[in-house]
Image (tube, rainbow, N blue to C red):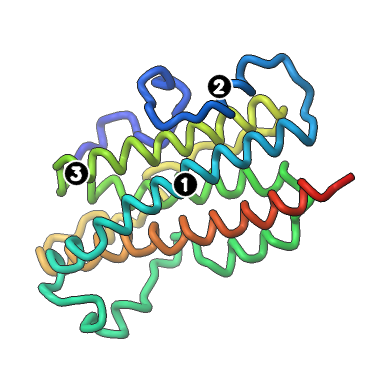
Amino acid sequence: MHTDLHPFWTDPYDDIADISLRTEDTVEVEKENHDTTKASYIKFIKSIINQLIITHQLACKMEVNFQNAVFGLDTKSIPKNVKDFNYDWLPTEESLLALETQEDKIEDILPKIYTQLQTMSVGLEVIFENENHTQFNRLKTYIRSVLCEMYIAMKDCHLQLPPDVSRSVMPNEIRGMKGKAEIKIRNWIFFRNFIDISKCIIDVLKIFLVHITNIN
């Protein structure tokens, strides 16, 4: 376990120069000495959505191979009790959909989504430790890039940064699993949760983008 290392989801701005996914919109916003205006909100949200789409697409491409490695089965053959299971400390679609009622409150939406992405990263970290090859390393970089965009947006829009999520959010009995089969199933649950929730985050941000774009 790499628990002695700095969590990859914290301080995403530190290695900003090494992140290749950043968009022209983000670079342009960073160069501006601007107020928290409607225009800057729109640029940031568009950039975050674009990064999330790229990250989600990569995870989806990896999904079938990961499921086969865990179960030796295709998606349709995964037992329903496993397919529908979720750890209670992970984000849920319901918690994200609740944000749709806060369309005009970027100060609520971005910090909450940032925290949810960090929480999912706690679970993904154990996958990255066990699956150390190119696609997983790439996914890790993409997630950090999304967090970086959100960090920049919150800082430049003068929003209060939420506290970083600690590894301790994952209970010890889940982190310390010993059996190979249960570890594989646990890791697949983490991975499936990320795919489902990242898609939901994209949808919520798109709704917010439409709302803020239509504000006079």
Q: Residue 57: where, in percent of width, then height?
A: 37, 53
Above or below: residue 138 compared with residue 157: below
Which amino acid does the dot numbered 3 rest on?
A: Glu
Among all residues in the image, which is located at the extreme right? 216
Label 1: state its secondary structure: helix
Task: Identify the residue position indicated by label 2 in the image.
Answer: 27
Decide which of tag 1 and tag 3 comes sooner along the chain. 1
Regarding mark 2 in the picture, which secondary structure is present there? helix
Q: Earlier in the sequence, mark 2 or mark 1?
A: 2
Given this view, does label 1 or label 3 mark the residue nearer the observer?
1
**Residue 161 position in % (x across, y down):** 62, 33
Residue 195, quarter of the rendered image: bottom left
Gap between marks 2 and 1 measured at Cα:
17 Å
Of mark 3 and mark 2, the one earlier in the sequence is: 2
> Image check: 127 left or right of 152?
left
**Residue underneath mark 1:** 52
Q: Are marks 2 and 1 in contact (CB under 8 Å)?
A: no
Picture coordinates of residue 69 (x, y %)? 12, 64
Look at mark 3 in the image and give the residue it sits on: 129
Q: Nearer the viewer, mark 3 or mark 2?
A: 2
